[in-house]
Image (cartoon, rainbow, N blue to C red):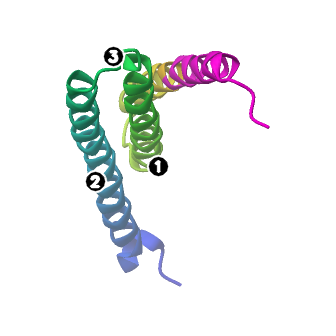
Amino acid sequence: MMSPVESGVEEWVLNIVLWLKLGVEALGALVIGVGILALGVRYVRRCLSANHDDYNQVRLSFAHFLALALELQLAADILSTAVAPSWDQIGKLGAIAVLRTALNYFLGREIREAEAARRLKEPPTG
């Protein structure tokens, strides 16, 4: 029986993972781009409206895009570790993953706190 290396399956799987990683990274960049466009539109609307009090809402909306993009970039990093050829690369990717996870955690916490504060300010319905 041939090994995965001899049959070419290992190279085939490596290429699929690398293409998938590239796609996930591109999707993360696309999410950031869409978030920037949405931020720009909301900011201009805010500036043109009489109510300038919702800046925090504009910022939180963008934070949701950033949190999703961070998750996608972390997924791309995980895919990279699956095919990383050296311990040095695995260590660098691990450090990046830790930083992205920490950023995502604090960003998510800020979003939750701001949404909870906004709910407290809303008048009760009913």
Residue 35 in the image, given as x and y percentages of width and height: 30, 39
Q: In terms of depth relative to the viewer, which is nearer, 114 or 55?
A: 55
Q: Nearer the viewer, mark 1 or mark 3?
A: 3
What amino acid is at disc 2?
A: Leu
Instruction: State yes or no: discs 1 and 3 in contact (Cβ < 8 Å).
Output: no
Tell me if residue 122 is in the magenta stretch. yes
Spatial distance from mark 2 to mark 1, Cα to Cα?
14 Å
- Mark 3, other Cα within 10 Å: few <14 / some 14–19 / many ≥20: few
Spatial distance from mark 2 to mark 3, Cα to Cα?
40 Å
7 relative position to 98: left or right:
left
> Mark 1 falls on what kind of element?
helix
Residue 126 in the image, given as x and y percentages of width and height: 79, 37
- Res. 52 mark: 3
Tell me if residue 77 is in the magenta stretch. no
> Mark 3 falls on what kind of element?
loop
Q: In terms of depth relative to the viewer, which is nearer, 75 or 55?
A: 55
Write the start and end of the magenta stretch as one range: 104-126
Rendered image quadrant of residue 32: top left
Earlier along the polypeptide chain: callout 1 or callout 3? 3
- Res. 22 mark: 2
Dominant SS of magenta comes to helix
Earlier along the polypeptide chain: callout 2 or callout 1? 2
> Taking the image as drawn, is residue 90 in sight?
no
